[in-house]
Image (cartoon, grey):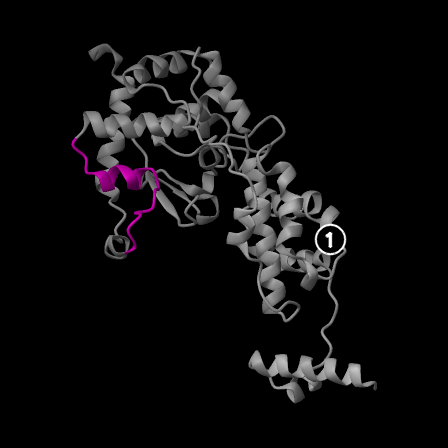
Amino acid sequence: MSLKEARERAASLRKQVRDGLDPVAEKKKPERKMVTFKEAAEVAHSERTAGFRNPKHAAQWITTLREYAYPHFGQLPVDQVSGPMIVVALKQIWTKKPETARRTLQRIGTVLAWATAHGYRDHEAPMQSIRMGLPPQPKTKKNHAAVPYPEAPALMCALMAGEDTVGRDALRFLILTAARSIEARGARWAEMDFSRRTWTVPANRIKMGKEHIVPLSDPALQLLQRIYATRSSSELVFPSYTGKALSDTGLAKVLHELGSNATVHGWRSTFRDWGSEETDFANEVLEKALAHQIPNAVERAYRRGDLLEKRRALMEEWAKFLLDVGDR
């Protein structure tokens, strides 16, 4: 080699030593296999599929990468994907689609972390630096519109007075149990125990990923018994005309037909406000009824009971508040 080449090679080897590397060992390392970002993303996604709560979430995970990351650096070797490239890819949607952009960034970071763990990269993505390179996002978070709790009995009365359709029955059940829409719409007869007066929602349909037992008040149990006597051919308690679970839009339509501008999810806020303002039930009982997780990890470790009997009394009071319109 020429003197110039020898000097350059020597300088490179000295740099390896300064970086704490052994030049001899580095030379013996096998050449790194070239894997594109797209290939890494597809494999990382397939390995995570079992951990997703539902197929829709699994599909969204990879779809955002295919739409917003692949066009920019999908065909590049995964070890060449840099922070500036990610900034360029996300800048076009960072303020227009803030939630989608944030999730896409998180998923890009996951792919690069996976690639690092498997030896295809030397380091993960500099997520903090990337965020600094992107403009501030607009604050778009809004609370779900809720029915003010003093108006809840009148609206429930109107709901009870209408025809017994699947959509109306599902909304009645959701309100009586203070359940999330996806939990109520996906309720199955196998989850109901009429003798114990409980509804056990499996972990895969609970936001916190932990089985939740809902005590059924008298009106909730009577509603289920009536439905079971006439519509028990499906495994779903509230099947649509196609045999699948009702959509959230279907419940929202029922609510809006009653003249309310609130959201279906907002009924949980109505229940929580009523519980705080009108009852003496402890905060942890109200939170447990909503299947919320205690924020404090230490407190959570000690509070392992499900407070079922206290929650049963709470749900009976809630049902009485909703249905005893004549006392108001």
Q: Pinpoint residue 198: horizontal percent, then vertical percent.
A: 34, 40
Q: Is residue 23 above or below residue 287?
A: below
Q: Is residue 55 in view from this perspective?
A: yes
Q: Residue furthest front?
A: 3
**Is residue 327 left or right of 248 when viewed as pictured?**
left
User: Closer to the camera, 275 or 235?
Assistant: 275
Report the quarter where the C terminus lies. Answer: top left
Q: Residue at x 71, y 74 (%)?
A: 32
Q: Pinpoint residue 110: horizontal percent, then vertical percent.
A: 57, 56
**Is residue 205 left or right of 17 when viewed as pictured?**
left
Q: Residue at x 61, y 69 (%)?
A: 122
**Is residue 33 left or right of 182 when viewed as pictured?**
right
Report the quarter where the N terminus lies. Answer: bottom right
Quadrant of the rendered image containing residue 276: top left
User: Closer to the camera, 61 or 305?
Assistant: 61
Quadrant of the rendered image containing residue 269: top left
Q: Residue at x 18, y 28 (%)?
A: 279
Does the magenta portion include 294?
yes
**What residue span does the magenta drawing correspond to?**
280-297
Q: Is residue 173 in view from this perspective?
A: no
What is the three-letter code of the residue carrying label 1? Answer: Gly
Q: Is residue 321 above or below residue 328?
A: below
Q: Is residue 295 above or below residue 163?
A: below
Does the magenta portion include 289?
yes
Circle 1 sits on which residue?
74
Q: Residue furthest bottom?
A: 24
Q: Pinpoint residue 47: horizontal percent, then vertical percent.
A: 61, 60
